[in-house]
Amino acid sequence: MISIVGLDQEERSAEELQVLAGYIKDIDFFKKRNLNEETMLEIVNCMNLLEMEKDEIVMEYGDIGQNFYLILQGEVEITVPDPNRKKAFLQLKKDIEAAIEVQN
């Protein structure tokens, strides 16, 4: 999967796009939307590999999101301003290998 996403979009074959679609079709976010095959292929064709450094900030609270991220390896901390100064921490249990950025 990482080798496919690492390719430039125009270099990916139809078979490679099918492989990527197979990986994401069972993710709850996509499954709940009951997307047809054509839409799934359009989505995976927009995927790009994005490797982040430890402690690198992807976006700040309040930013308008332009991308959808699938995190394939590592941990992500999500901090939301709270009067009680609590923060949410999400640790991924799956160890796949990288992050994928889906752009418009």
Image (spheres, rainbow, N blue to C red):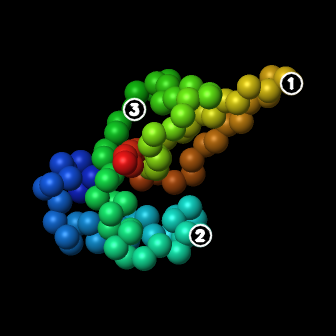
Q: Is residue 77 above or below residue 104?
A: above
Q: Position of residue 6 (x, y in %)?
A: 24, 48
Query: Which one is earlier in the sequence, the residue at label 3 or at label 1?
Result: 3
Residue on which disc 2 sits: 32
Mark 3: give few (<14), some (14-19) or many (20+) Cα within 10 Å.
Answer: few
| Image position of 78 (left or right of 10) | right
The residues bearing labels 3 and 2 have C-alpha atoms spaced at a distance of 28 Å
Name the amino acid type tagged 2.
Lys
Residue lying furthest left: 11
Tag in front: 2 or 1: 2
Write down the quadrant of residue 63 in the picture: top right
| Residue 89 placement (x, y as % from top left) | 67, 37
Work out whether residue 97 can be spotted: no
- Which mark's residue is nearer the viewer, 3 or 1? 1
Query: How packed is label 2: few (under 14 Cα within 10 Å), some, or many (20 or more)?
Result: few
Hey, which residue is sitting farthest right in the picture?
84
Q: Which residue is mark 3?
A: 52
Q: Earlier in the sequence, mark 3 or mark 2?
A: 2
Between the residue at mark 3 and the residue at mark 1, the CA separation in whole angstroms equals 30 Å
Please name the amino acid that badge 1 sits on: Asn
Total residue callouts? 3
Work out whether 33 lies above or below 8.
below
Earlier sequence position, callout 2 versus callout 1: 2
Q: Which residue is mark 1?
A: 84
